[in-house]
Amino acid sequence: HDRQYNDIGHLGRWGRWDGMNPYMIYRNGAGCQDDQAMIIALTGPDTFHSRRELARLKQGFISKYDPSGLNTVTLRDDTLTYEALQSAATAQGLLSPRRFVAVERATTAGKDFQQQIVALLEGERIPSEHIVIFWDETPAADPRRRGAAPTSSPLATWLSKLPLKTRAVKPGQNYRQDFPQLNGRLLEHAVTELADAAKVRLTPTALTELIAYTQGNLWQISNVLKILSHAAGTSTSDSDVARVREYVHAEADADMFQLMDAGSMRQVKKALALL
């Protein structure tokens, strides 16, 4: 698990290292290694941390190079077409030569579409100043691993060959960062850090109950901790099992109402996201 990463840019207390700054590639106006665009893959079922990492990279780019937001593009769902990706990835930036393109769930798209993306990535049409990030909750198959299941996704296969992000990855080099599902002590440490950030003090039993009641869903845990934080106010008392159970059910009931509303309004994508 020493190759899992957090979103705070240093060695966390639960063993995640995240020390590389991808924006160092722009020093002295130089582009990426070998004058190629920088390609990053963020994959794995721990979408809570992979989403945070994507947001961190995006915000870092905006703060440093794109305050107007004109050169930051996210393609997903209906906006993810080959024409849109080609245009976003190959066009020169406005007011800046650099562009940031985030592509979501492309590895589950049609095979022909994926082959077009691979051809685009292997060509030399994407300017070296650009960063293209592929985000997906599907774990990338590691080609070095014995018995690895073959994938029918051309893009997933291509991305799986990127070097895994470790201390050895040089600034500006393409890389893949995997976010496996957290379990056991790693999950407990993650929840503890979220509780500390929300200024919520959980008893050890309450921590165990929170993980058990939410089945380790960090998105739900984060929401429950926010509710607990507001409920506790300035209190310094620990949040016990009874309080955790109360607000877990409150958060679940809120999701159920949202699901019913989405269903009644035929908002299929929103309803599926809540299931």
Image: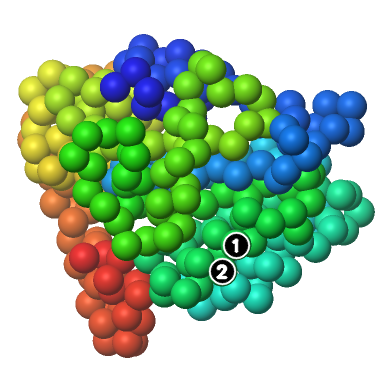
Q: Position of residue 153 (x, y in %)?
A: 37, 61
Q: Position of residue 141 (x, y in %)?
A: 32, 44
Relative to 9, is 134 above or below?
below
Q: For mark 2, what is the residue?
A: 116
Q: Position of residue 218 (x, y in %)?
A: 28, 41
What residue is drawn where x is 38% and y is 23%?
3
Give the camera-side residue of 213 and 141: 141
Q: For mark 1, what is the residue?
A: 119
Q: Is residue 194 visible?
A: yes
- Look at the numbered disc 2 and give the secondary structure of its residue: helix
Query: Label 2 neighbourhood size at 10 Å, few (<14), some (14-19), many (20+)?
Result: some
**Image quarter of the C terminus:** bottom left
Q: Position of residue 39 (x, y in %)?
A: 60, 44
Dot 2 and dot 1 residues touching (CB under 8 Å): yes
Query: Tag 2: residue type?
Result: Gln
Query: Tag 1: residue type?
Result: Ala
What residue is drawn where x is 62% and y is 22%?
170
Occupied quadrant, residue 206: top left
Relative to 148, is 10 above or below?
above
Give the camera-side residue of 80 and 95: 80
Q: Which mark is residue 144?
A: none
Relative to 94, is 242 above or below?
above
Q: Is residue 240 visible?
A: no
What residue is drawn where x is 57% and y is 75%?
81
